[in-house]
Amino acid sequence: MRMFKFLQTVGSFVVVLVMVLVWGVPLAPAIVYYHWANGLISFDHQWAQALVTGLVLSSSFIVYIFSLLTFSAILQFILHLRIKEKTVVPLASLHTLRWAFCGQVLRSTQPFLQHFVPSFFANAYFRVSGAKIGKNTQINTFRLNDPGLIRIDDDCVVGGGATFNGHLVEKNQMIFAPIHMKAGSLVGAGSTLQPGVTIGENAVIASSALVPKYRTIPAGEVWGGLPAVRIRGSSSRDESEA
């Protein structure tokens, strides 16, 4: 554990170097674009030239954002943990450090990613970062933490501000457990899904609900609250209970 604390201290300095890398490399294409675009048009009038410069600067920033998100996603694709089931490792482990590196890369891009949800580009970002996302799925949040531990099937909806966390720390152990939304399910705005949660087909999680770790929501049911409890069962189950 002492060695891990030492590694954490060193890691704090490494984070700075990571940010230099993650934020710095994508600046290169933005700078090249700026010099190219700024040289296309030139006006003698001060205000006209100022307007052109402003537009070139703003479009250069957009180029930077796309470059940043692309570079970030590629880094996560290369380094993220390939985990298919619940996995427990010591807190002081290389798995933890690898997860922490990817988490820092993700957090460094989330302020920019939020402007692209929902969109095909955001879905592509999460896919490259490790998430498995089906067809016709609408993701309205940028808080899909631990993308490599998230699977969302076809025709699902994730509400704005929803948070998915595929990890937790218990008793000096790091626990990774995949989250799975099955086809047609919906997670309401502001909800939180903890590690190991499975949402059944066509099930609904109400807005601002908290689904505890390892919970399985049966198909077709509606759950809500803190923590989430069953509000309404599936039609077939309600008929059998009647």
Image: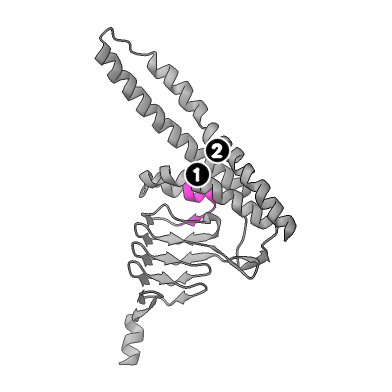
Residue identifier under label 1: 108
Identity of the residue drawn at 48% across and 34% down: 67
Residue identifier under label 2: 22
Residue 223 drawn at (x, y percent): 36, 75
Q: Amino acid at mark 2?
A: Val
Helix or strand or loop: what does disc 1 sit on? Answer: helix
Asked if residue 127 is among those painted magenta in the image, a careful observer would answer yes
Residue 169 drawn at (x, y percent): 59, 66
Range of the magenta residues? 125-133
Q: Amino acid at mark 1?
A: Ser
* 220 lies above or below 193: below
Q: Image quadrant of residue 5?
A: bottom right
Is residue 80 at all visible to an observer of this figure? no
Is residue 150 at all visible to an observer of this figure? yes
Helix or strand or loop: what does disc 2 sit on? Answer: helix
* Gap in angstroms between the C-alphas marked 2 and 1: 8 Å
Residue 90 drawn at (x, y percent): 69, 64
**Quadrant of the rendering where the N terminus is positioned:** bottom right
Residue 78 drawn at (x, y percent): 62, 46
Q: Is 15 positioned to the left or the right of 1 in the image?
A: left
* 231 lies above or below 68: below
Query: For the residue carrying disc 1, how many other residues have a C-alpha within 10 Å: few (<14), some (14-19), or many (20+)?
Result: some
* 188 lies above or below 25: below
Asked if residue 196 is among those painted magenta in the image, a careful observer would answer no
